[in-house]
Image (cartoon, rainbow, N blue to C red):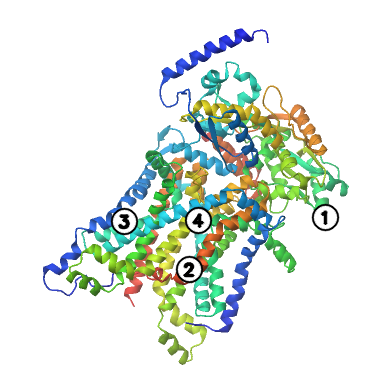
Amino acid sequence: MKILGRPSLLIASTLAIVWFLPLIALLARSLDRAGFENYAAVLQGGDILRNLMNSAIITLITVFGVVAISALAAFAFSILRFPGRNVIYGILLTGLMLPAGAILVPFAQLNQAFAWGNTYAAVIFPYIALFFPLGLLLLKNAFDGLPHELFEAAAIDGGGVWRMFVSIALPLGGPAVALVALWTFLSTWNEFLLALLFLHDPAVKPVSLVPFQFQQQYFVDVPKIFAALVISQLPVVLLYIFTQRRFNLGALAGIGK
Amino acid sequence: MKFTAKRNLVCAVIAATGLLLAGCAGGASSPVASSGPVTITLESWTPSQKVMDNIVAEFEKENPNITVKATLLPYADYVTAIKTELASGTGPDVFDLQTGGMLNEFAPLVTPLDKLATSQLGADWKSAYKKSALDQSSVDGAVYGLPHGFQPAGLLWVNKTLLDANGIKIPTTIGELVTASQKLRAAGVVPVAIGAKDDWMLIDIFSSMSNAIAPGDQYKAMDGKGSWDTPGLVKAFNEFASMFKTGVAQDGAAGAATYTDTYDLYADGKAAFFTNGGWNQDMFVGAADRIGKFDSAVTLMPTSAGPAPVIAGISALLAVNGKSKNQEAALKLAQFMSSGPGQQIVMDGSLDFSVTSTDLVPSVKVSANASTVRTALTAMLKDNLAGYREVPNAAVKAALGQALLKLVAGTIDGAGAAAEVQAAAKAG
Amino acid sequence: MSKTSSRPATSGHRRTDWRASPAAILFVLPCAAVFAVFLAYPLFRNAYIALFNWNGLTAATKWVGLDNFVWVFTSPVVLDTARNTLVFGIITIALQLGGGFLLAVALAGNGRIRQVGRTIFFIPVVLTPVVVGFLFSKILEPNDGELARGLNALGLGALVHPWLADPNTALVTVSLVNVWLWIGFSMSVYLSALTGVPTELIEAAKLDGTNSRQLVWHVLVPYLRPTHFALLTLSVIGTLKTFDIVYVLTKGGPSGSTELPTTLLFRVGFDEYKQGRASAIGTVLFVVALVLTIINLRIANRAEKTE
């Protein structure tokens, strides 16, 4: 629904053009000196396709993990009742406030204990831990907003809580679930610190490490580095453009409650 | 050689004893005579990916039982990564260390080579390397890694073509450099491209300058026999800072990284001077077409006390992870890269100087310009060398880097910088 | 918290039983387990490390009790990061929330142009901060970067400045890049919230003759208060956790002018080999984030109750 008229649109559009300029610079720089040759060289270099695949695997598993555990817990906190419910919820939410950098060393020690070095697990578990609090927050709010009569009706019908979860909460909370999935996807795909520290085997490196890797390979051939950057970002940008309509961040708007 | 037979027998006995002792020591780090195929991992910040691929290919040809997985990262990220890996027990079998502070910190996690190398490479394994290189690879007399590469640092690369076009002679004092810089700026040329975002670059420049302005003071301070706030060193700090106030350094130097901001400025012929070390010779291999458009030379850093001597050290040393399960194979790779055929490949790719006792020289064809530069660098190493390059204490090195960065930013003066470094040195 | 009644209108025991289902434990267990092992344990372990001097590498440690924490609260270097966080946070949050809100209002509605505009602002959000940092460090290069060249071409050469290299301008520059990166996010949240505004409200206001400014300021802003608080909370937390973009752009320099607690933590741990201090910073940072969030939520709740 349109709110403001032409003048505001004009200002916003001008701003949008300014906003877009850096992206044009990115593309321009990737074509410097050798043109599309840069892209060819990078793709032939071999690794970037594997990096993309690694990113995809790590991200999809993380997204699934985060959605699963936060939906389950959100359901319990929102719909069920048990002692200490609010306290435990609050405690779990503190995970939102922990910067990854602060717990790098303990993560390293955990990896050593579980012998997960250089495997996907070395980053997947920390990612799930770091990203589930936001999912929990969003989903609990979404479930809070569901009409309770539905659950009452299901209870009368003799359905168990699991069925309520699967057939009522999840479907109706769909938009929020999609949001959590998309947001976790972005956060995981773009994460570089933990990946840099824990994933060294080229077989498991994700695409977020591309800038560092290509600095070594195309040492002084900066345009190729930019070509690699564009390639590494393309999947996510395309994903966003095609799923735009679903990207309803309304669920975030209500978390103050 | 006359005593070959006897020497071989002696070696064999020592080797056997070594193996026996190692076997008795037990534990995961005892070298197991591997009969099956092994895979070893290597990590470093150098050389470039292409050179590394060549080395791995050659090594695997010679050692069909060993597969090598090499990972390269830019220096700063490499240090972060290797530290975390070693702390979480996932470190590679073989990795590079810098001499000085880094070596001192990492030594406890690395296998001391005296036993391992003797048993595998023979009792005279040390003779393959220059003594000074081994010294830089040792802590308290025990060798912790095989040195490789040697380069002078703290010198100036010169675009002679640009200088000639502007009628400027190579400066030998800081005054001449300032005048030259002003003239170059007027002509739209970047005077001295300094990657002042890199603390290591600033440390190189400062360390060579200080040895002209306050000869010996810095080494005394670094060796724990003197302090950092001598009048001479304060003067050196101030003179260093002056380069960023008198227009000598390019605009925005503080935000420029050597790789590749200032490197590009020089390689594209936009800067008359470029601060970088002897390793920059790899330009003649990696960016030959860009560099080929003008004439390059090298010269010593100009100071108020005349040209400053260079500092030099081994590029790095290859160490074997104390927790590696393939210590033998790891050492083999390290030896291959530092004094074996691998070193030759590195030399051809980066035009390093060698640390092997029998000097290796690059076997690739390079331009005439590259040869003259190399001759000049060799002369510098022979006649204008002040001493070692790497700061022995990691905390002091960090403080020195931070102080120099602040001098560049202009937030402290020479006395302040000296005081900061001295404080870190005292805190130990 | 939940607005729905906690006592369903039922009669008899049986119907309330299902809410007290013992299965609740199973629902919460996965989260709790992940939290305990991968968040709680590391947090406490980190606080424990902070009680020692340790180089982060070898086994040698030395007990120093609360020394490292004292250092955090008294060291000028750490206090500088607090100041930087404040500046960075104020610029970032003000521009992102304010700008995001205005953009949402201007770009709400259908139509090609509006849609394209919204997309353009959101694309930076999906980019990796590392890529953005690398890109902008080149764009902002005073000798050769796109911005410098553009200003020169427009005759505004006087504005060219070593933005990232000058300690006086670096922090603001980094903050602005951060705004470029994230404003699309706030805009999107506001856009979604705006879809919940009843059209009657807006129609009525327009019929009353309210002009745009009044519509925005007196109708929409108050209506979206919960959203403001939600975004504020998330932004404060986000600011305190910022690391990637600053690390790649300036690594905390020049001269510590862009040093945030997270980048300092990194430098102290990895460059100075003082893990104990780094851990102390991390622990304090977490506590500060916690306190600020609680305060924020309290204010939000109180504001809501007065409506």
The chain letter for the residue carrying disc 2 is: A
Q: Which residue is painted at 37% across and 70% down in the image?
A: A254
| A89 left or right of A134 in image | left
Question: Mark 3 Cα within 10 Å, few/some/many (few <14, many 20+)?
Answer: few
| A172 left or right of B30 in image | left
Do the numbered discs 2 and 1 sit on residues whose CB atoms are within 8 Å?
A: no
Which label is found at residue B186? Answer: 1
Name the N-terminal-most of marks 2 and 4. Answer: 4
Decide if residue C83 is in sight here. Answer: yes
| Gap in angstroms between the C-alphas marked 2 and 1 | 54 Å
Q: Where does the image place residue B14, in percent across and percent down from the top left?
A: 53, 12
Q: Where does the image place residue B227, in percent across and percent down from the top left?
A: 61, 32
Amino acid at the residue labelled 3: Ile
Q: Which residue is mark 4?
A: A190
Residue B347 occupies quadrant: top right
Q: Which residue is mark 2?
A: A243
| Gap in angstroms between the C-alphas marked 2 and 4 | 18 Å
Q: Which residue is painted at 30% across and 50% down in the image?
A: C33
Instruction: Locate the N terminus of chain B by quadrant.
Output: top right
Q: Where does the image place residue C251, in percent across and percent down from the top left?
A: 57, 50
Decide if residue C168 is in sight here. Answer: no
Amino acid at the residue labelled 4: Asn
Do the numbered discs 3 and 2 sit on residues whose CB atoms are within 8 Å?
A: no
Residue A138 occupies quadrant: bottom left
Q: Where does the image place residue C138, in percent across and percent down from the top left?
A: 65, 56
Please name whichever residue, C194 or B229, is drawn nearer the observer in this view of the structure: C194
Q: Which residue is mark 3?
A: A91
The chain letter for the residue carrying disc 1 is: B
- Check disc 1 and report its element: helix, strand or loop: helix
Q: Are marks 1 and 3 on the same chain?
A: no
Q: Residue furthest left?
A: C12
> With respect to residue C194, does B372 lie above or below?
above
